[in-house]
């Protein structure tokens, strides 16, 4: 620390003030308020390497990476110990204005704004833990109001009609929708299902894993979202019979393809037996099918 006494001070006054400034400076050091001259962007990259990569789920880690461009352009050049709540509030407010979404020209969705702030918050939380700063300025930031929109949910009659219309579709689509609607399994849980998880004798399906996808890793198997997500569900005989049909169809296809078939044991696979990524032609197909059926036939 450097301190320069005003020209009006006497030598004795300056000596006393130097002692006072030294005590204050030492107190700041003890509280972690004095840091290395590190900018937010530089420290955030350390956070990614030291904390995010080894501790966050892969999907969460890659989502955080996507926020870097917008956050770094706003506060990346600022020193960690100089960033104020007002600066972060100004950044958050800017995301609610027209043009924040470069693709549509609209404001960012409230959920996306929360995720951007969450990234900044987590970086500062790690900085506090590491003694780089004394407090987290994000704690004083106010998020824009999130207007909850009512979710559109099918009535039992619409669901039944939808399932009836599925009878004319390929078996893999009929199986996917029937099982998802009956069980309430998440998409990642559905894709993570393996035939060893299906107990045909007792009509039981066990959720033990999820199948996820990121651009960096491709398709990979992960744990369930929470420990409580691991569960066992009793399934109706009707659904189990459809699953038996799907198993027989897969076995026939594996026999036909021979060496071209990749044995993954997954219920829902690509043409050659490989696991289906979340972003694939399969899901473009079923999403489009669901949308068109909903619009045209479920009125």
Image (spheres, helix red, strand yellow):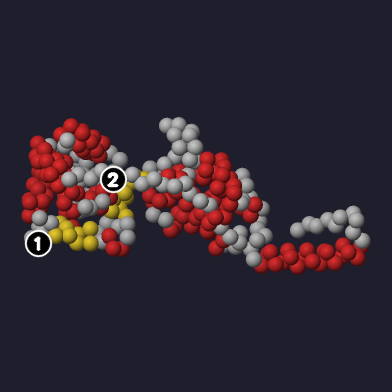
Q: Residue at x 17, y 45 (%)?
A: 155
- Is residue 244 visible in the rendered image? The answer is no
Query: Mark 1 sits on what residue?
Result: 202
Q: Badge 1: how crowded within 10 Å, few (<14), some, or many (20+)?
A: few
Q: For numbered disc 1, what is the local secondary structure?
A: loop
Q: Residue at x 11, y 41 (%)?
A: 161
Q: For numbered disc 2, what is the local secondary structure?
A: loop
- The image quadrant where one finds the N terminus is bottom right
Position of residue 11 in the picture relative to residue 269 (left or right): right
Between 144 and 287, the one lying in front of the other is: 144
Q: How far separated are the C-alphas under marks 1 and 2?
A: 35 Å
Q: Which mark is residue 294?
A: none
Q: Is residue 162 above or below residue 53?
A: above
Between 204 and 273, the one lying in front of the other is: 204
- The image quadrant where one finds the C terminus is top left
Q: Residue at x 39, y 45 (%)?
A: 147
Query: Mark 2 sits on what residue?
Result: 151
Between 114 and 213, the one lying in front of the other is: 114
Q: Position of residue 208 (x, y in %)?
A: 25, 59
């Amino acid at each position: 620390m450097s301190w320069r006494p005003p020209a009006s001070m006497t030598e004795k006054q300056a000596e006393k003030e130097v002692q006072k400034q030294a005590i204050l400076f030492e107190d700041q050091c003890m509280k972690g308020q004095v840091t290395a001259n590190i900018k937010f962007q530089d420290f955030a990259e350390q956070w990614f390497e030291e904390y995010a990569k080894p501790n966050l789920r892969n999907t969460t880690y890659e989502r955080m990476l996507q926020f870097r461009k917008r956050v770094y352009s706003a506060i990346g050049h600022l020193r960690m110990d100089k960033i104020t709540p007002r600066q972060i509030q100004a950044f958050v407010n800017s995301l609610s204005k027209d043009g924040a979404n470069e693709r549509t020209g609209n404001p960012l969705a409230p959920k996306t704004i929360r995720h951007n702030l969450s990234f900044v918050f987590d970086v500062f939380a790690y900085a506090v833990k590491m003694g780089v700063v004394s407090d987290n300025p994000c704690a004083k930031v106010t998020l824009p109001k999130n207007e909850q929109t009512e979710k559109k949910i099918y009535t039992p009659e619409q669901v039944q009609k939808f399932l009836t219309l599925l009878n004319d579709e390929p078996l893999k689509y009929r199986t996917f929708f029937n099982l998802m609607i009956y069980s309430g399994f998440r998409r990642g849980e559905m894709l993570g299902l393996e035939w060893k998880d299906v107990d045909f004798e007792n009509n039981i399906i066990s959720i033990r894993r999820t199948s996820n996808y990121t651009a960096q890793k491709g398709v990979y198997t992960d744990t369930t979202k929470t420990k409580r997500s691991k569960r066992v569900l009793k399934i109706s005989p009707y659904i189990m019979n459809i699953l038996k049909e799907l198993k027989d169809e897969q076995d026939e296809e594996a026999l036909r393809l021979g060496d071209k078939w990749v044995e993954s044991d997954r219920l829902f696979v690509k043409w050659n037996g490989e696991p289906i990524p979340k972003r694939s032609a399969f899901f473009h197909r079923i999403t489009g099918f669901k949308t068109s059926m909903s619009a045209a036939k479920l009125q």
